[in-house]
Structures are given as C-alpha cells and as structure tokens.
C-alpha cells in the first residue's frame, strides 16, 4: 500500500514561511477541564504568534499549562475558547479525516512521556511515522535515529533501552516526517549534557535550515539561551514573552 502524504510537509513549511502567515497564532485561547467544583482552568486568555522558523522555548512551573498549550497547538485537544491557526489554517474547523491529516503532515510531537509502542523495535517505532509521510521510510528512519545518536539500537524494543535512548527514539519519530511545526515537551529531560546538546543542536538546525518552527517546553532555563524567544507561563496565562538578542549555539549550553 502506498501511503504517501497528501501534503508534502517540507513544502508546507516553506509555503508558510513565504506566505507571511505565522506558523502558529493563538488568539484569546483558553482551556477548561471538567465542570463544577472539579473545574480546572488550564489556560486562559492566551495570545501568541510564532513566525515560521522561530525557535521558542516555553518555561513555567509544573501545572502552569505548558503541555496543554502544546496539545492545543497540535490539534490533539480542542480549546474551550479562542482561535488557533497553524500556517494560516484555522484548525478548529478541521473535522475527522482533515484533522488526522493535519496532525500527520503538519505537526511533529515529542511527548513528555515518550509514548513509544512497546511491541515495536526502535526502528519500527520511527518507521511507522516515516511510512505515513513519504517514501524510503527505512532509510529516513535510520538517518533520523543516527541524527540523535541512537542509530545503533534500532533493533531493540523500548523496554530494552535506557530512558534517554527512548527519549531520542521519540525525537527521531517526530523529526522523521520533517514537520512544519515541531512541538517538544521536555525533550531533554532524561538526557545528559552532551546528549542534550546534540539533540538540541538537531532541533535548532531544523528551525534554521528548514523553516521548521519549534516550540520546546522545558524546566531547564539554560535552554532558553539558545531560543529566538522565550515565553513564560504562569497559572495558565502567558506572563512574559521576550526575544533573545543573540541566541547561543546548543554546544555552548551548560547544565
Ligand atoms: N485531562 C485533564 N483533566 C483535568 N485537568 C487537567 C488535565 N490535563 C491537565 N490538567 C490540569 O491543567 C493544568 C495544566 O496542566 P499541564 O499538563 O498543561 O501543565 P504543565 O505546565 O505541562 O505541567 P508539568 O510541568 O508538570 O508537565 C494543571 O492544573 C493540570 O492538573
Ligand atoms: Mg507538562
């Protein structure tokens, strides 16, 4: 079966870059879970515009709404209010198959808790995504694993990998489809300094060379030094947003 993408993600990234539409725009976005006494306002009044190719770091205490913001931007969850556009496309209007295609072709997710399929090897975990988004799935998957430094463990199952190796397989799975919008939730939380720098360097390069837009959530404020912009969340709202005048290279980070 040939499952080529309906939309070439790289073309979509370049189109977004040249069309003038922001890579991501959130206007008046809020998200409330539950109702009555158990009601939780996870996000409120969020206005955010991210340009194509921008590398944005999101900082904030636990529970401040960082994962919620990524899930909304990637169309995994629906906002309770407000409008979200990705490369000029209002994603609230997408239904069924359209929403699936949007998530498959436009967005790459690195989840906070990896979400690897335990019964597939590392290589197969990456291949399932590669097959959905273009030809030469195995070669692209091997290359993606190599880029993040786990090319030698492709035949192992997630249960046979360290936390940091699993994390890097999850990153390979997200970058293998070269998504226009890459949403990363604590992608270096389980990595040592050298490996973290390597992975962050790969993400930075995708943003710089390919117009891929990166939103990266972290508790490590040192990573903010390599961003184009840093956005702080506090109690479900953006408390501050600041451009970084001279972002440093990933190789210069220390922790
Ligand atoms: N499915 C859900 N149902 C109810 N409440 C939720 C749900 N998901 C998140 N929340 C609540 O929304 C708020 C924001 O959660 P979120 O996961 O976005 O925080 P976070 O900033 O990513 O935190 P962390 O740094 O711990 O990962 C928290 O109060 C959380 O308990
Ligand atoms: Mg989170």
Image (cartoon, rainbow, N blue to C red):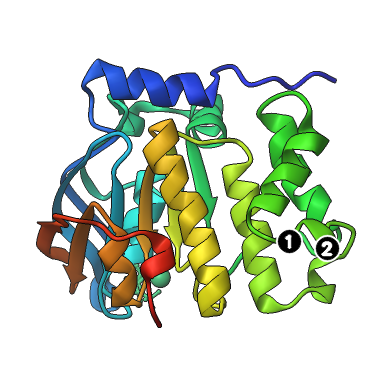
Quadrant where the N terminus sits is top right
In front of the other: 138 or 46: 138
Task: Inspect this view and state whether residue 77 appears.
Answer: yes
Q: Quadrant of ligand 2?
A: bottom left
In this figure, what is the number of numbered marks? 2
Q: Position of residue 214 (x, y in %)?
A: 38, 48
* Residue 221 tag number: none
The answer for how far apart the CA atoms under marks 2 and 1 are is 6 Å
Q: Position of residue 147 (x, y in %)?
A: 64, 51
- At a point 37% along the width and 68% down the height, the residue shown is 252
- At a point 32% along the width and 80% down the height, the residue shown is 62
- At a point 54% along the width and 30% down the height, the residue shown is 105
Q: Position of residue 184 (x, y in %)?
A: 45, 57
Quadrant where the C terminus sits is bottom left
Q: Is residue 219 above or below residue 242?
A: below
The residue wearing badge 2 is 153
Q: Is residue 237 above or below residue 164?
A: above
**Labels 2 & 1 near each other (Cβ < 8 A):** yes
Say few, some or many: other residues with alpha carbon within 10 Å of mark 2 (under 14 / 14 to 19 / 20 or more).
Answer: some
In front of the other: 103 or 42: 103
- At a point 62% along the width and 67% down the height, the residue shown is 167
Where, by quadrant of the figure, is residue 63 drawn?
Answer: bottom left
Q: SS class of the residue under badge 1?
A: loop
The residue wearing badge 1 is 150
In front of the other: 141 or 35: 141
Where, by quadrant of the figure, is residue 121 drawn?
Answer: bottom right
């Amino acid at each position: 079966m040939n499952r080529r993408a309906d939309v070439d993600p790289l073309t979509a990234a370049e189109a977004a870059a040249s069309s003038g539409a922001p890579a991501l725009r959130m206007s008046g976005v809020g998200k409330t879970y539950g109702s009555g006494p158990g009601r939780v306002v996870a996000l409120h009044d969020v206005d955010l515009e991210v340009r194509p190719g921008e590398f944005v770091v999101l900082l904030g205490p636990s529970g401040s709404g960082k994962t919620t913001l990524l899930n909304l931007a990637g169309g995994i969850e629906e906002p309770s209010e407000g409008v979200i556009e990705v490369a000029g496309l209002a994603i609230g209007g997408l239904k069924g198959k359209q929403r699936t295609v949007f998530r498959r072709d436009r967005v790459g997710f690195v989840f906070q808790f990896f979400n690897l399929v335990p019964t597939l090897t590392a290589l197969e975990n990456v291949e399932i995504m590669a097959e959905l988004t273009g030809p030469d799935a195995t070669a692209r998957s091997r290359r993606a694993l190599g880029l993040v430094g786990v090319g030698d463990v492709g035949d192992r199952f997630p249960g046979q990998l360290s936390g940091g190796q699993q994390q890097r397989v999850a990153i390979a799975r997200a970058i293998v489809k070269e998504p226009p919008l890459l949403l990363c939730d604590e992608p270096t939380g389980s990595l040592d300094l050298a490996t973290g720098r390597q992975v962050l360097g790969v993400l930075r390069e995708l943003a710089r060379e390919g117009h891929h837009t990166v939103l990266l959530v972290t508790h490590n404020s040192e990573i903010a030094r390599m961003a184009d912009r840093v956005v702080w969340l506090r109690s479900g709202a953006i408390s501050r947003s600041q451009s970084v005048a001279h972002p440093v290279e990933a190789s210069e980070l220390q922790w």
